[in-house]
Image: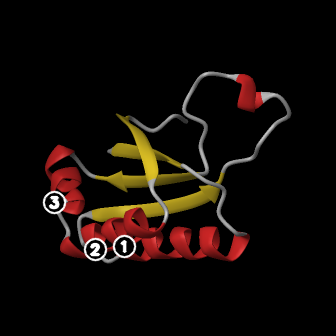
Amino acid sequence: MIHHTMIAAFDQPLPAEELDQYLTDIERAMSDSDAVLSVAVRRHIPVPGEEAIPALIATAIVQVAVADTDALAKASAEPGLHKVIDHWQSRHPYKVAWANHEPLS
């Protein structure tokens, strides 16, 4: 099993309702792929002083479990996922970092 952990960092703060909708949209798009075993989405929990760190600081975290690299490639190519990404990037630009890894526990 592979976990694809994505960190999304929006350029500007989002209102709570919009961040909730982003998380719902991404979760739904990933869940619609038959290549995905599970999806979890969460908000980043800020801590005081982190804004002083010169790093990509998350707005949201998305973790997707897939069976193998072929399943990850299939899930990543889903047109519905790209439609969601394009929609959100056009309204609220964001940067993404990700890691593909074995389960952490």
Indicate whether 100 appears above or below 23. Answer: above
- Seen from the viewer's position, the closer of residues 8 and 15 is 15
Compute the Cα span from label 3 to label 1.
Answer: 20 Å
Residue bearing mark 1: 87
Q: How is the image coloured?
A: secondary structure
Residue 72 horizontal/vertical position (percent): 23, 52
What amino acid is at disc 1?
His
Compute the Cα span from label 2 to label 1.
Answer: 6 Å
Q: Residue at x 37, y 73 (%)?
A: 87
Task: Give yes or no for contact between labels 2 and 1 (Cβ–Cβ under 8 Å).
Answer: yes
Tag 1 secondary structure: helix
Disc 2 versus disc 1: nearer the observer? 1
Disc 3 versus disc 2: nearer the observer? 2
Callout 2 crowding tier (Cα within 10 Å): few <14, some 14–19, many ≥20: few
Callout 3 crowding tier (Cα within 10 Å): few <14, some 14–19, many ≥20: some
What amino acid is at disc 2?
Lys
Q: Quadrant of the N terminus?
A: top left
Q: Quadrant of the C terminus?
A: top right
Residue bearing mark 3: 74
Residue bearing mark 2: 83
| Between discs 3 and 2, the one toward the N terminus | 3
What amino acid is at disc 3?
Lys
Left or right of residue 47: residue 68:
left
Task: Give yes or no for contact between labels 3 and 2 (Cβ–Cβ under 8 Å).
Answer: no
Q: Residue at x 59, y 43 (%)?
A: 58
